[in-house]
Structures are given as structure tokens and as C-alpha cells.
Amino acid sequence: MPGKTMAPEHGKLAPAAPPELAALIDRARLEWLAAQNEFNSVTEPDLVDHAIYAMHAAERRYVYLLRLAARLRQQAPEALTDTPVSRPASLPAGSG
């Protein structure tokens, strides 16, 4: 199916974010990947809309958590490292 999204490579979260947030981001990424896999494998027309909804919802949650982590990193610049926060392909580098 054309237009399917691919998950980004997952970078490590800088230590400025609480460990709980890092765990939430990891879980959200896995949920997004699972939703993408479901979308890629759905064959029933009645389930396509649900698969699209689930994939978009999981992606939005993942992006939200990444942006939250980026904001926390900005609030604690002394804790920054050169370890990147992963960014989905659909999120431009300057946004957030």
C-alpha cells in the first residue's frame, strides 16, 4: 500500500529527561511500530480505518513525548549531551 510510514531509528534520550519519560517514549515507539505492522497486514476493508486511526494516534503520542523530552532538555541546558533524541520522519527538524 503506497504512503505507508516507516519508523525512525531510535536514538537514546539525553539524561536530562526523567527515566520514566524515557520508558514512556520507548513504549510509545513500540506501540507505533505495532500499529504500523497492523496497518501493513490488515486485509479486511472494515478494519482499515481502525488501523489508520490507531497508527496516527500512536504516532501523535510518540511525537508528543519526544517534544516533551526536547522541552525538558532545553530547560536544563547544563545536562545536555550530544546524544540525540530520535525524531520521526514526519517531524521537521526545526519544529517542536
Image (cartoon, grey):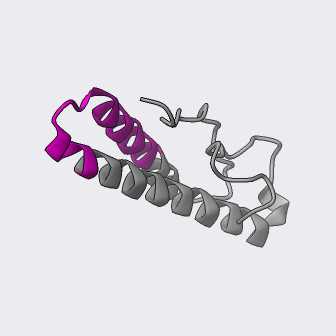
Residue drawn 42% across the image and 49% down it: 28
Q: Position of residue 43 (x, y in %)?
A: 20, 30
Q: Position of residue 8 (x, y in %)?
A: 59, 35
Which quadrant of the structure image shows residue 77? bottom right
Q: Between residue 1 and residue 90, name the one nearer to us.
A: 1
Q: Position of residue 7 (x, y in %)?
A: 53, 35
Q: Between residue 58 and residue 82, name the one nearer to us.
A: 58
Q: Is residue 75 rendered to the left or right of residue 12?
A: right
Q: Is residue 64 rendered to the left or right of residue 51?
A: right
Q: Read off the magenta span.
A: 26-49
Residue drawn 23% across the image and 32% down it: 42
Q: Is residue 95 visible?
A: yes
Q: In the rendered image of this protein, does residue 64 appear above or below residue 89? A: below
Q: In the rendered image of this protein, does residue 42 appear above or below residue 49? A: above
Q: Is residue 9 rendered to the left or right of residue 43?
A: right
Residue drawn 68% across the image and 58% down it: 16
User: What is the magenta segment's predominant secondary structure?
Assistant: helix
Determine the residue located farthest toward the bottom in the rendered image: 75
| Image quadrant containing the N terminus | top left
Q: Is residue 20 visible?
A: no
Residue drawn 41% across the image and 54% down it: 56
| Image quadrant containing the C terminus | bottom right
Q: Position of residue 11 (x, y in %)?
A: 64, 36
Q: In the rendered image of this protein, does residue 78 appear above or below residue 37? A: below
Q: Is residue 35 rendered to the left or right of residue 50?
A: right
Q: Between residue 16 and residue 86, name the one nearer to us.
A: 86
Tell whether position 37 is magenta: yes
**Number of on-image labels:** 0
